[in-house]
Image (cartoon, grey):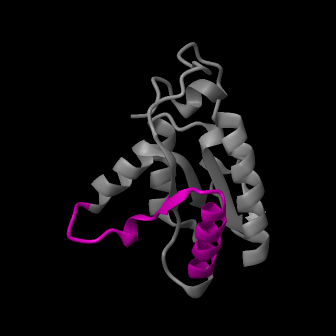
Amino acid sequence: MGRDHTFMDQEFGRPDYDPDDQGNFELGLVFVIMPFRGQEMADAYTAIKDECRKLKLRVKRVDENTGSGLIIREITDLIERCEFIICDLTNERPNVYYELGYAHGVGNEANDILLIAKEGSTLHFDIASLRVQYYSSSEHLRSIISSNLKAMIKATRK
């Protein structure tokens, strides 16, 4: 899975960073990291799924899996094999921060991860310096997802 370098190797110009290392991933798979509760988050997820489908991308969120599998293993597996990650930082959920940290640690790079949050969301210290796209409504989110994923695909697929 992943690459031989991490997010921080790229960001801090460490010698392990190899811009030509495409890594191993499942083409077209998008893993969504987000809070699950509430109608607002359900609407956000619907917007994400719809826009990804338009780009012929397959969306997965771990709560959609069936059976009694080990959830953390399913999460790490999806993080390790997806092409892109969409991470919604709304509601300051610890699991979202944990999963984002894991994604950075296993080699997902800035152009592989789209960070979003509902306007007014608080970002904690360790990620406050990262680029986050703030959305005001489901329609605004649709626009953000569409334009950013198109740019991410163009930047990462060679």
Instruction: State the image coordinates of residue 39 (x, y, percent, origin top left).
Output: 58, 86
Q: Is residue 151 left or right of residue 99?
A: right
Q: Is residue 51 above or below residue 109?
A: below
Residue in front for this viewpoint, 153 or 104: 153
Relative height, residue 117 to residue 44 (above, below): above
- Outermost residue to the top: 15
70 vs 11, left or right, is: left
- Hey, which residue is sitting farthest left in the picture? 68
Res 89 visible: no
Which x, y percent locates residue 19? 62, 21
Nearer to us in this view, 19 or 121:
19
Residue 103: x %, y % from top left: 48, 44
Quarter holding the N terminus is top left
Image quadrant where residue 38 sits? bottom right
Residue pictured at 44% horizontal, 33% vertical: 24
Measuring 55% from the left and 51% from the top, which residue is drawn there?
A: 85
The residue lying at 44 percent from left, 61 percent from top is 95
* x, y percent for residue 52: 62, 61
Q: Quadrant of residue 133?
A: bottom right
Magenta range is 41-70
The stretch drawn in magenta includes residue 52: yes
**Quarter that holds the C terminus:** top right
